[in-house]
Amino acid sequence: MSNDHDQHDSFDPVLAAASEWMLKCDRGLTPREQDALSSWLAASPRHREAFAQCRWGWEEFDRLAGLSEVRARPADPDLLAHASTPPRRQARWLWPLAASIAVAGILTGIGMGLWRTDASRGVRPDPIAITRVEQRMLDDGSRLEIDRGASVAVDFARDVRRVRLLQGQANFQVAKDPSRPFIVEVGSVAVQAVGTAFSVQRGTGDVAVVVSEGVVAIGTDSGPAADHRGGTLLHPGDKGVVSLSEPGGAVRVTQLSREQLDEAELWRPRLLDFDSVPLEQIVAEFNRRNPLQIHLADSAIASRQLSLSFWSDNVEGFVRLLESSFGIAVEWRGASEVVLTGKGGRARG
Amino acid sequence: MSAPDSNRSQWFIDEVLPHEADLRGWLNVRFNRVQDVDDLVQEVFSRLVRAYDTGPVANPRAFLFVVARNLALNDLRHRRYEAMRADALADPLTIADEMAGPRDLLAKQEDYKHLVEAIQSLPERCRQIMTLRKIYGLSQKEVAERLGISVNTVEVQGGIGLRKCIEYFRQKGFLRTPTP
């Protein structure tokens, strides 16, 4: 979504690369990254200038250290969310208008700060962090969707594109480049593809690979840039499972039905578009796709019809929109359950 | 010494030096494997003075602890100490805050207007990351835990946040645009 936003700015790819480097420096570079950064800096004076600006800017923010009174209070990620936002954000809208603005906001990636109206002032409990599924584009144009709680490490070389799935599951839509095989490593299991789409899930004892497009080979990761095409081949609709403790062992291949395939991909973000749909149905759709479960405690709101567009993993934004613009009271019960009730009075639909 | 220099010295004596003992004590206890604490303290002081020379500093004590911890963690990482003590990762501001006097810092937000506004202009996720990393001094890993997102996301979204902040600075003329 941030890409949509970028196009309106004068997007500067050198600055983007420099700021990525700054964040890597901030978390600590690996020796390999250190080398890569040195050569990137050596490549152009524009790189050096952009990086110098990023370093300056990054350190400049240290001035804000301890800006707020922090004693005996958990860190508030939204400390700066309320104050002096543009006037548009402070307006109280009538709800039909709010819906269209809010939806436009999400489509252009303006951000969720939009819906922090003062309705929640004072009584808002500590924000509960709801993870979004991460959508990430790699340098080669391949797209990754990284599920909540999953993590990957990208390691691209000239002759091979390696991505390590450290935990959880991810979906890969691989950009075609026959000269550089794309390999997903899970422990010592290697999943190789050339221009294809598939999901890999790292379980406790095994790895599951589901192919939606193209052909994928599962093998072991022995030897440098080994050709894994000698391994077990999976075709679209196939699910292959291999033990992590016995990576050279047999791959159990099953054919998934259309429904099973859809089921397996429910976690992946989709733009959900609702046109005058009862809230009950919208909530059911979110619940199917998210670990966070929304309960409607009130039949009056269940039948209210709403029109909105949301990414399926942006359940937090959805709940916040209901709270701020549709007169719905929200009660969080831990991080995985939220109960909605009508406040009465404002309901119009 | 010129007048600004003597102001600075006075400020340093009043606002910074009183925290030195706490800072050293904290470093010695929490980061006892840092090779040269003196060096580190000098570096933190000189960064703080540089910051003071070029603009306001919200909370010198917090600045000292946050920057010191960043440098200490870097030092440990460089020397490949994998197993860092869990308590070394305690929120530095909790410690910085102990014994700190009452403050009215948010009232002075005007002074940091360009920084605060740059953060406020960010998309939510970027804003939260910058806030936790810079105001609360959490490490990227801690930010990930606090927000329940992956460390990858913190790195990527933090990078986007920083880029947007720099663009904001350029737009507002706080920073010159690189000559093409």
Image (cartoon, coloured by chain):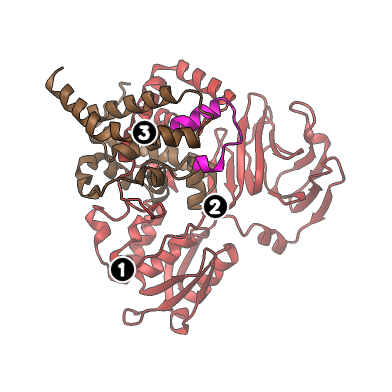
Where is residue A302 drawn, in percent x and y? 47, 79
Question: Which label lies toward us, 1 or 2?
Answer: 1
- Residue at 27%, 67% in the rendered image: A93
What is the letter of the brown chain? B
Badge 3 is on which residue? B21
- Residue at 24%, 30% in the rendered image: B13
Residue B74 as seen in the image, left or right of residue A327: right
- Give the CA distance from mark 3 to mark 1: 45 Å
Query: Is residue A317 among the parts visible in the rendering?
Result: yes
- Residue at 21%, 31% in the rendered image: B11
Question: On the image, which quarter does residue A231 sit in?
Answer: top right
- Give the CA distance from mark 3 to mark 2: 45 Å
Badge 1 is on which residue? A119
Q: Amino acid at mark 1?
A: Ala
Density class for disc 3 (Cα within 10 Å; few <14, some 14-19, many ≥20) is few
Residue B78 is inside the magenta segment: yes
Residue A154 as seen in the image, left or right of residue B153: right
Q: Secondary structure at mark 1?
A: helix
Question: On the image, which quarter does residue A179 sit in?
Answer: top right
The extreme right residue here reads: A250
Q: Are marks 3 and 1 in contact (CB under 8 Å)?
A: no
- Residue at 56%, 37% in the rendered image: A138
Badge 2 is on which residue? A133
What is the letter of the red chain? A
For residue A172, above or below residue A118? above
Q: Which residues are magenta?
A: B70-89
Question: Which label lies toward us, 3 or 2?
Answer: 3
Density class for disc 1 (Cα within 10 Å; few <14, some 14-19, many ≥20) is some
- Give the CA distance from mark 1 to mark 2: 28 Å
